[in-house]
């Protein structure tokens, strides 16, 4: 009877340890810290545009960067230029608490950056982020830091009429940066945009 009890106890211990071994380890959850939801640019853009127009009425957005670190003070930054102001631009930083900061950036040469209009992108930031995160190999996600990574809406070359991309930058905060591009209208992955 005693041997049967020990045998049942050992079998139960084995089953419990096997089940526990199938559960995800809490120490290996680096990818779990990446946000599942990010700031929707379409909802935030009117606020950024209104702030830029305080600087200059014809301000035009040329690039946006969305932070992926939920602890970041500023969750989005947007760069604007004006076709009537040649030697400066403005960068607007917005926090998740509606606080904004603006910085005037002086240019040595007149700006020739092309603006990004609402017609240049169809996918909103969350859609783009979901598509791009599916493209990133898990080995890069595990080694990267969300605090050094971002999702950007930009052109590969701001001076030509090139495609507007959603660009996911995955970084380990040191020496490894991976860039993933999708067309901001179609969501099509682009290996190395020209």
Image: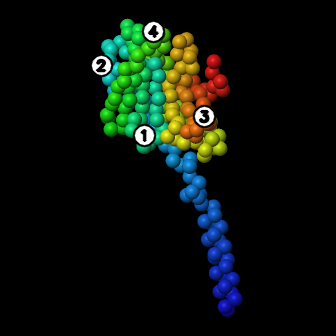
Which badge, 2 or 3, is on the more N-terminal residue? 2
Residue 185 seen by the camera: no
Comparing labels 4 and 2, the label whose residue is closer to the camera: 4
In space, the residues marked 4 and 2 are separated at their CA atoms by 21 Å
Residue 146 sits above or below residue 65 on the image: below
Which badge, 3 or 4, is on the more N-terminal residue? 4
In space, the residues marked 2 and 1 are separated at their CA atoms by 25 Å
Which of the 4 image quadrants contains residue 10? bottom right
- What is the crowding at mark 4: few (fewer than 14 residues within 10 Å), some, or many (at least 20)? few
Badge 3 marks a residue whose secondary structure is: strand
Q: Name the residue carrying label 1.
A: 72
In space, the residues marked 2 and 3 are separated at their CA atoms by 35 Å
Looking at the image, which residue is at 41% across and 11% down? 87
Q: Check contact, mark 3 vs mark 4: CB within 8 A.
A: no
In space, the residues marked 1 and 3 are separated at their CA atoms by 19 Å
Which badge, 1 or 3, is on the more N-terminal residue? 1
Comparing labels 2 and 3, the label whose residue is closer to the camera: 3
- What is the crowding at mark 2: few (fewer than 14 residues within 10 Å), some, or many (at least 20)? few
Which badge, 1 or 4, is on the more N-terminal residue? 1
Q: Check contact, mark 1 vs mark 3: CB within 8 A.
A: no
Looking at the image, which residue is at 66% across and 26% down? 191
Q: Name the residue carrying label 3.
A: 177
Looking at the image, which residue is at 51% across and 22% down? 154
Residue 76 sits above or below residue 118 on the image: below
Badge 1 marks a residue whose secondary structure is: loop
Q: Name the residue carrying label 4.
A: 110
Which badge, 4 or 2, is on the more N-terminal residue? 2
**Where is residue 58 shown, x and y percent of the image?**
35, 12
């Amino acid at each position: 009877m005693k041997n049967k009890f020990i045998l049942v106890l050992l079998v139960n211990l084995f089953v419990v340890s096997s089940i526990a071994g199938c559960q995800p380890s809490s120490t290996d959850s680096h990818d779990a810290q990446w946000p599942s939801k990010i700031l929707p640019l379409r909802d935030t853009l009117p606020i950024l545009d209104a702030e830029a127009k305080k600087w200059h009425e014809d301000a035009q957005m040329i690039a946006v960067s969305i932070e992926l670190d939920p602890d970041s003070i500023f969750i989005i930054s947007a760069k604007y230029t004006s076709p009537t102001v040649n030697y400066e631009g403005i960068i607007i930083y917005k926090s998740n608490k509606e606080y904004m900061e603006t910085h005037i950036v002086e240019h040595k040469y007149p700006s020739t950056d092309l603006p990004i209009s609402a017609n240049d992108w169809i996918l909103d930031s969350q859609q783009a982020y979901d598509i791009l995160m599916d493209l990133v190999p898990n080995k890069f996600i595990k080694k990267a830091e969300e605090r050094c990574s971002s999702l950007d809406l930009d052109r590969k070359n701001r001076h030509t009429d090139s495609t507007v991309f959603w660009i996911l930058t995955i970084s380990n905060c040191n020496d490894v940066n991976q860039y993933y591009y999708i067309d901001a209208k179609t969501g099509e992955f682009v290996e190395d945009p020209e």
